[in-house]
Amino acid sequence: MQQFAARGVHGQTVEVLAQRILTGQLLEGDTLDLVALQTEFDVSLTVLREALRVLAAKGMVDARPKRGTFVRPRSAWSLLDPDVLRWQFARSHRPGLFDDLHELRAIVEPGAASLAAARATDEDLETLDAALADMAAAGDDAAAAVAADLAFHRALLAATHNELVQRMEVVIETGLAERDRMVHGAAGPTDPVPSHKAVVEAIRRRNPTQAARAMGKLLDQAIEDVARLEGTRHEDRQN
């Protein structure tokens, strides 16, 4: 699924309106004052309408005769849209969002590892090995560590050779990217290589049970990393 490119005045208008909806500055059912927004953003009505069309395509706003443009209920939003996910994870607008991500990963990725153990090709294993090598080489480079981790999990889903499982990449990768940036940007993250290597080795041995178990342990470590970081931030706020 292609993401919206937030460039120029048009892109900035989309981003600001999306953030206002996600943070509750614009509530479900609120009617947007287009004239006021046009003046505030100093944009043409054409630019504003184009921005609203982007949000309408994601289920966040709609327009009706006599009512105008209004914010749709959250139940109508395309929550699996990569931009909607990115906007939410970027500022963690909803408490428990990372918990939802962990739960989703716990449902999907151990099963994916199990499938990969049964179906992975030599090329799949080479891709996983390359991601591991990049992970080891990243060292303290947070950006490189994030890129390597995303490449690993993308390769894992691809190794299932199940198109529907592979499409979960949109949700997992978007949330994982934000989680990784938070964890790898902090001091002293847990070395990710051993837990990821255990998954690859189980896949290489063609052992679905061990692969699923290794992925479960990896996810447990991911939860601990976030919990430790959140605990550190809580202590910093108290001091």
Image (spheres, rainbow, N blue to C red):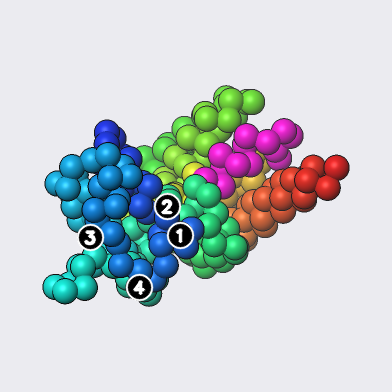
Tell me, for residue 25, which label it has, or none.
1
Q: Callout 1, which amino acid?
A: Gln
Tell me, for residue 29, which label it has, or none.
4
Q: In this rendering, would 48 be left or right of 115?
A: left
Foreground mark, 1 or 3, reads 1
Q: Callout 4, which amino acid?
A: Gly
SS at mark 2 in the image: helix
Q: Could one spot residue 196 in this view of the protein?
A: yes
- The quadrant holding residue 127 is top left
Q: Is residue 172 above or below residue 78?
A: above
Specify the segment rendered in magenta.
Answer: 178-190
Q: Could one spot residue 221 in this view of the protein?
A: no
According to the picture, the residue beneath numbered tag 3 turns out to be 57
Measure how far apart labels 2 and 1 are at the Cα level: 8 Å
Pick whichever of labels 2 and 4 is earlier in the sequence.
2
SS at mark 4 in the image: loop
Foreground mark, 2 or 4, reads 4
